[in-house]
Image: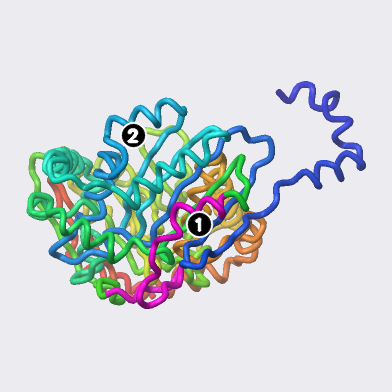
Amino acid sequence: MFRNFSRLNKSILNPSNIRKLATAAPPGPQVSVLANGLTVASQSVPYALTATVGVWIDSGSRSEDSKNNGVAHFLEHLAFKGTQTRSQRDLELEIENIGSHLNAYTSRENTVYYAKTLQPNINHSLEILSDILTKSSLATNAIDRERDVIIRESEEVGKMYDEVIFDHLHAVAYKNNSLGRTILGPIENICSLQRNDLVEYIKENYKGDRMVLVGTGSVNHDELCEFANKSFGHLLKSKIPNVFGQPKTIKTHSFPDFNSDEIKIKESSLPETYMALAVEGTSWNSPDYFTALVCQALAGNWNRSVPVNNGSPGIQIAIGTGHHGEPLANSYMSFSTSYIDTGLWGMYITTDGIENYKLIQAILNHWKELKKGMFYKHQFETAKSQLKASLLVSVDGTTALAEDIGRQMVNTGKILSPEEVFDSVNKITEDNVVDWFNKKLGAGKLAIAALGNQVDTMPSHKEICNEMVRYN
């Protein structure tokens, strides 16, 4: 593609044409709020022939209690099983006939329903989404059929050990808080949830001021607002007005104090040991949000099966000092997970070795180096570049763009442009990073979850926390 660059782009490089291209840049996101509090956010993409439209709900498993944990995910399954005006078969045929694709997912803090559709069918797709969200039939026979499906899904998730470890990590870090519960809920809840539980959850959480209708691609903002008012205008507001990006006033949203503790599950049948170590991270609205992401990129990732890795050289050296020179780990991945009022930052590691004591020591040595600023200038700049690239890739395409806009609105109450994001990242200094590492890694508070055949070769939680403090 680049061989004819100079020949093909002479006209583009002409100053007058540069001005023309600049004026053709897409407008920024448009945001409106309806009388019932429902927010409409859109981003038009020039020349797009398709659109992604969907509803982001400021409610997920965190909005549940111990008795109905799993209900938000259960509702997601029932969404496409029929409404008061359409049977499941009617829904499937109608969606297929207009060439749209519907999808949905549930997270700890959000529930999302969206459609990828051709431009002429935007309103039709939104009407179907409205029908699904506000007029779901929730038939008893459909509920009973779906129990088995969700139980099988739960069994499959139980074999995905990265998912299992992070569920255990949340349970440890957010003990006795709704944020520590799983999204699918326990099997006993899946078996016992009844139609009334689903109806009550909808009444409590599916409010106008807890929803954002998002449209990206070939969309018109005024038309979206008009349709949103027609199809979602009947939804009520919360009794206490909801503010996006702020803790909810409902009883399940108590502040989640970070709990420094561990869970180790011995499972001799597993070929590997899976572990996650996390300190308290940053919330979506924290002024250190992007600093934590730069720190994550600087901590790096590594996998012994991948020839080229972007892991920190310090830890790559450390993990290569096991028995017979073999790596102490099979892989490690740094992560930074944010919620409205808290977050988790740490490392996820897999290993089949028996030298987990030495492995943990290598991780702690790596953290010690980061706290002391023992990294090169080019490593710091590379971490920032990698973060900016990943943020840019995350908005490539109408669906990814809709996801970014919806996520930002419900979690922060605002939408940052790529330029604003890049500016925030560019302003982060090495001192900012070192200060953040010392604040978080030097507190001596750590949540640990481990599962596998060699958990008993790990140092104790107390030993690890003491070592973290000793390294200050």
Q: Quadrant of the C terminus?
A: bottom left
Which disc is residue 229 wearing? Answer: 1
- Quarter of the image holding residue 271? top left
Residue 354 left/right relative to 254? left
* Crowd class of label 1 (few under 14; some 14 to 19; many from 20; radius 10 Å): some
Secondary structure, mark 2, is helix
- Overall secondary structure of the magenta stretch? loop
Query: In the rendered structure, which segment of residues is drawn in magenta?
Result: 224-250
* Crowd class of label 2 (few under 14; some 14 to 19; many from 20; radius 10 Å): some
What amino acid is at disc 2? Answer: Leu
Which disc is residue 91 wearing? Answer: 2
Residue at point 45% right, 40% down?
A: 115
Q: Is any part of residue 423 visible from this angle? A: yes
**Where's residue 442, x and y in %?**
37, 74
Residue at point 40% right, 45% down?
A: 129
* Residue in front for this viewpoint, 344 or 437: 344
Q: Is residue 188 magenta?
A: no
What amino acid is at disc 1? Answer: Asn
**Where's residue 277, x and y in %?**
29, 60
**Vertical side of 88 occupied by 33: above or below:** below
**Where's residue 110, x and y in %?**
36, 57
Secondary structure, mark 1, is helix
Q: Is residue 246 magenta?
A: yes
Residue 293 left/right relative to 103? right
